[in-house]
Amino acid sequence: MKAVLLVGGYGTRLFPLTLRLSKCLLPLAGKPVLLHTIELLKGAGINDLVISLRKGQSEIEKYFGDGGEIGVNIVYVYEETTSDEDKLGSVGAMNYVLDQIQLRDECLFFGGDNFVHELNIRDLIDHHREMEAAATIALYELREKELVRQYGVAQIDEKRRIQRFQEKPRVEEAFSFLAATAIYCLSGKFTERYLPEYIEDVRAAGKKPDMIGELWEHLVKRIPIYGYVFSGMWSDIGNVKTYIQTNSATLKHIPEQIESSRIAPTACLRGPNIRIERNTQIGTGVLIQGPVFIDAGCKVEERCAIGPSVSLAEECKIERGSTINKSILFEEVEVGKNTMIEDCVID
């Protein structure tokens, strides 16, 4: 089975970060968002990947190459779009990539700005096949009910077939808090027939087949579409706030590892999930409160407090007496002495 990863969005809500770096390459606990997804798929035995992107995102192909170094096979499909205004949208991008690689068989689709932890992909596929579903949507129950305004939600029956779909309702009008993640298992019949027919109908009506929620609202009463409810962790990295929150949650799952030997004896490393990479200097009296990720070549001077929930990319320099928590610092950031940083992303 192939998995298609849609990463061609412009990430406008994360400007200016995404003017330099595609959203799927933003670091989460020291790894690009997309690498977390690829590792999840690889762990489920899904090694044949298609990455759908747009012009101007060649840095993604440069980063991952053919996937050989990480044990997968990657093919790239570039959309012929040049701006957020003329992009194909989620539905159009799905059909475009299927056409380009001539794939009309059962497959997985992942939105590139999703971060997922503890999703059992094999179980999702098994449920999809057992129910003989046309499509299966991974659903996640929202813990914060007010977030329902940002997502499509599904109402399911006892067999988990989706009975109704509602796109971005107000809290008081929502009939469910099961959010549709951008993770789908699609049957061959869906990719070969239902999706192209829907797009043809929408275009015939003079509209653009863009919003994925409208696709599900249209099809849910016509064909068997099922939900697969999972727990664990899911986040849509749509803006700076959710990016920081997702990084904080991801840090709680990193393995503890101290590779640097240049840590002052009086430095204090407190709490779980602390990872410090090679050639990092930690000065006297420094407090590191996990979870924290410090990449290679960083320098943290004396009497600094780092953490909790901090990621420092390569070659960052934190001058003496500074405090950083719940923040993400990109490579080669320098922080002056006695500086306080909280809930920030610094590039």
Image: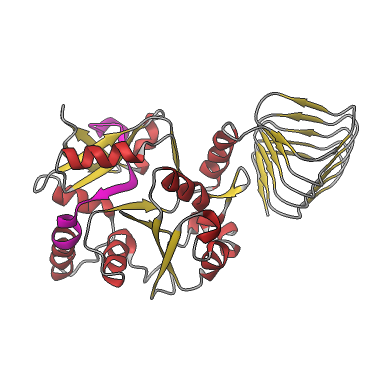
Residue 278 placement: quadrant: top right
Q: Is residue 319 above or below residue 98?
A: above
The residue segment tinted magenta is 169-193
Residue 287 located left or right of residue 68: right
* Residue 232 in sight: yes
Colour scheme: secondary structure
Q: Residue at x 20, y 49 (%)?
A: 216
Which corner quadrant of the image does residue 320 belong to? Answer: top right
Q: Percent position (x, y) of residue 165?
A: 20, 41
Q: Is residue 184 magenta?
A: yes
Identify the residue at horizontal 16%, vertical 36% (top origin). 161
Place of residue 331 in the rendered image (x, y in percent of width and height, measured from the top left): 71, 54
Residue at image position (12%, 44%) is 224
**From this viewpoint, is residue 169 visible?**
no
How many numbered markers are drawn?
0
The quarter of the displayed image where residue 44 is located: top left
Q: Is residue 312 left or right of residue 246?
A: right
In the displayed structure, does residue 278 sit left or right of residue 149?
A: right
Q: Which of 233 and 328 is in front in this view?
A: 233
Left or right, residue 57 beside residue 266: left
Name the one closer to the observer, 41 or 286: 41
Give the percent coordinates (x, y) of residue 233. 44, 34
Image x and y of residue 172, in percent: 28, 30
Q: Does the magenta stretch include residue 110?
A: no
Q: As drawn, which residue projects farthest toward the left?
A: 222
Question: Looking at the image, is 80 positioned above or below residue 166?
Answer: below
**Quadrant location of the C terminus?**
bottom right
